[in-house]
Image (cartoon, rainbow, N blue to C red):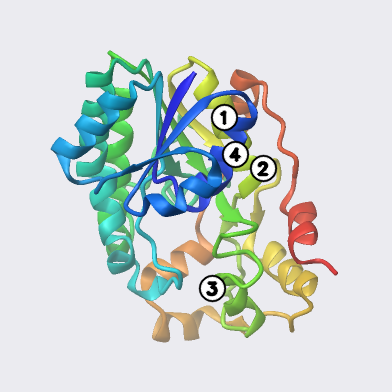
Amino acid sequence: MRVLVAGATGAVGLWLIPALLARGHIVAGLARNPGAVEPLGALPIQADALDRETVIRCVKDFRPDAVVHQLTALPSTMDLVRFDKVFEQTNWLRTKGTNILLEAARSAGAKRFVAQSFCGWPYARTGPLVKTEVDELDPTPPERLRTTLDAIRRLETTVVGAHDVAGAILRYGGFYGPHTHLGRGGSMAEQVRRRRVPVIGDGAGVWSFCHIADVAGATVKAVEGTAPGIFNVVDDDPAPVATWLPFLAKTMGAPPPRRLPMWIARLILPEHLRAIMTEARGGSNELFRRTFDWTPKYPSWRQGFVAEFGA
């Protein structure tokens, strides 16, 4: 199969391209910096993802059977206080970039389109602590999350509604592992090490994780499959912040996280950070496992954190 990966040098692309090549696929990587694609073994394609004419021409020239949308524009250091600003460019890629890439896939005759989305805080902060794909997204998100959630909705609606290609949306859990923010030397890992990520209130917000190697393996399954729809791609162990954050700190050999009472958090932290840490819902991977016969290498973040940060 001929597979084009857009966003080839991002966290997922760095793992996905070698995984696709190992399966015998012919792979091209679309990126602004083609020099970073060549060492991965893929055919490098240089293009600005928002340059419609160039993207359509490049994709048509490659003639992919499948297109994988992994376009993001995240900084190496995440300032989640300024969440809306941090995700501003990524949201353009989720909206305008998706439209361009989908048009290019159609023009090239691709039959499969797989796109990155997110599982976790986008789900409604009411009802079950672990959500499935049929559960609604947050109808009243905190203000600084609204633009990003709107972009996620548009991406998902656009891809799932594209009846001329088999579109699959992968709602990934929080990434961890090499070349991610939660890997050795990653910005979030360093914040945890310095005790700058506290347990807020009761720490009841439920997070779902997925090791970046499992993310790549799941994406290969989706590319090779034909089932359309929306799928949570997460491990088997959604867990509250009050459980996973102290475990992570201990595994890293870092001091335990600070505890921040909710009354203080309301005074000093914006609403969206409080919501993510105390009200977020996790996701179930049952549908993806069943549909694509997938089993994660790291069924739980407990094993994965030890593999990444243990001595």
Position of residue 273 relative to residue 167, above or below, is below
Mark 3 is surrounded, within 10 Å at the Cα level, by few (under 14), some (14 to 19) or many (20 or more) other residues, namely some
Q: Which mark is residue 235?
A: 2
SS at badge 2: loop
Of discs 2 and 1, which sits in the foreground?
1
Please name which of the two marks, 4 or 1, marks the residue nearer to the observer. Answer: 4
- For mark 4, give the secondary structure: helix
> Does 176 appear above or below 246?
above
Q: Earlier in the sequence, mark 2 or mark 4?
A: 4
Residues at circles 3 and 1 in contact by the CB criterion of under 8 Å? no
Residue 220's disc number: 1
Numbered disc 1: secondary structure: helix
Nearer the observer: mark 4 or 3; the answer is 4
Q: Position of residue 170 (x, y in %)?
A: 47, 35
Amino acid type of the residue tagged 2 in the rendering = Asp
Residue at left offset 66%, top offset 69% = 184
Q: Could you say whether the residue bearing mark 3 is in a helix, strand or loop?
A: helix
Q: CA distance from mark 2 to mark 4?
A: 21 Å
Q: In the drawing, does residue 192 fall left or right of residue 227? A: right
Looking at the image, which residue sits at the far left? 53
Residue under label 4, please give it: 18
Q: Is residue 87 above or below residue 171?
A: below
Residue at image point 55% right, 40% down:
16
